[in-house]
Image (spheres, rainbow, N blue to C red):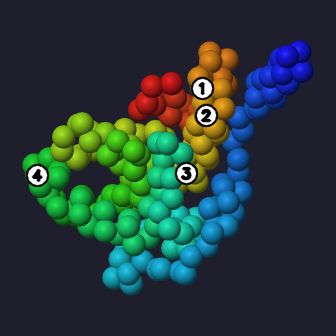
């Protein structure tokens, strides 16, 4: 029995000392491309000004859940989702096709909410409970795609901690919030999920 207690204490100490880190986007890219697929480029007719990192990753992967809140669409799915939500019926009245085409849907979470970026590579979160799509219903997290990847990876680390510890204690929450603030002050301020 004593050995079991010592083992559990040792294991708890290892779990407690796991530190969350902001991995460089290039390292995250390497992980995502470890199961590289046949390249599926975006249609030549698309004129959206994609971030190079985004294109390099999404044309070579299958849709992947990076973390519980961050699923990254493969290129084919992203085209399909963006075309689907380009229908004016999903947007508030008076949104022109020209305005709608400035947004690209690149991911989702498990609750039907969407991740999108604009033609300036600014990432937004859209909560589907906000009804119609429009700038006012997009949460600006002051991230670009590279920082979103880091956020998704950080969130995966938090998921792993929860899976191993069955909770996110206050110390972990503080650590997580510090990392969010390092990525972006707006991310912490406008964070769309409960911590």
**SS class of the residue under badge 3?**
strand
Picture disc at residue 66: 3
Up-down relation of residue 160 to residue 165 (above or below) = below
Q: Earlier in the sequence, mark 3 or mark 2?
A: 3
In this figure, which residue is indicated by the disc labeled 1? 166
- At x 60%, y 30%, the residue is 162
Image quarter hosting the N terminus: top right
> Alpha carbon of mark 1 to alpha carbon of mark 4: how far?
47 Å
Q: Earlier in the sequence, mark 2 or mark 4?
A: 4
Horizontally, residue 81 falls left or right of residue 73, namely left
Nearer the observer: mark 1 or 4; the answer is: 1
Horizontally, residue 56 falls left or right of residue 121, namely right
> Alpha carbon of mark 4 to alpha carbon of mark 3: how far?
35 Å
Q: Are the residues flagged by discs 2 and 4 in contact, CB closer than 8 Å? A: no
Q: Earlier in the sequence, mark 1 or mark 4?
A: 4
Picture disc at residue 163: 2
- At x 41%, y 40%, the residue is 140
Nearer the observer: mark 3 or 1; the answer is: 1
Q: Are the residues flagged by discs 1 and 2 in contact, CB closer than 8 Å? A: yes
18, 9: nearer the viewer = 9
Question: Which picture quadrant has residue 130?
Answer: top left
> Alpha carbon of mark 3 to alpha carbon of mark 1: how far?
20 Å
**SS class of the residue under badge 1?**
loop
Horizontally, residue 3 falls left or right of residue 157, namely right
In this figure, which residue is indicated by the disc labeled 4? 94
Disc 2 packing (10 Å; few <14; some 14–19; many ≥20): few
> Alpha carbon of mark 3 to alpha carbon of mark 2: how far?
15 Å
Q: How many marks?
A: 4
Horizontal and vertical percent position of residue 163: 61, 34
């Amino acid at each position: 029995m004593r050995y079991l207690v010592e083992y559990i204490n040792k294991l708890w100490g290892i779990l407690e000392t796991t530190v969350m880190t902001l991995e460089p986007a290039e390292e995250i890219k390497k992980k995502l491309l470890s199961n590289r697929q046949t390249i599926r480029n975006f249609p030549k007719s698309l004129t959206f000004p994609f971030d190079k990192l985004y294109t390099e990753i999404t044309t070579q992967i299958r849709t992947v859940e990076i973390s519980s809140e961050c699923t990254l669409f493969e290129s084919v799915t992203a085209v399909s989702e963006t075309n689907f939500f380009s229908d004016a019926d999903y947007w508030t009245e008076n949104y022109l096709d020209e305005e709608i085409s400035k947004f690209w849907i690149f991911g989702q979470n498990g609750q039907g909410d969407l991740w999108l970026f604009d033609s300036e590579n600014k990432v937004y979160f859209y909560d589907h409970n906000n009804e119609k799509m429009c700038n006012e219903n997009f949460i600006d997290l002051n991230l670009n795609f590279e920082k979103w990847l880091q956020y998704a990876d950080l969130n995966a680390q938090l998921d792993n901690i929860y899976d191993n510890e069955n909770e996110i204690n206050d110390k972990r929450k503080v650590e997580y919030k510090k990392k969010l603030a390092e990525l972006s002050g707006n991310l912490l301020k406008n964070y769309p999920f409960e911590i």
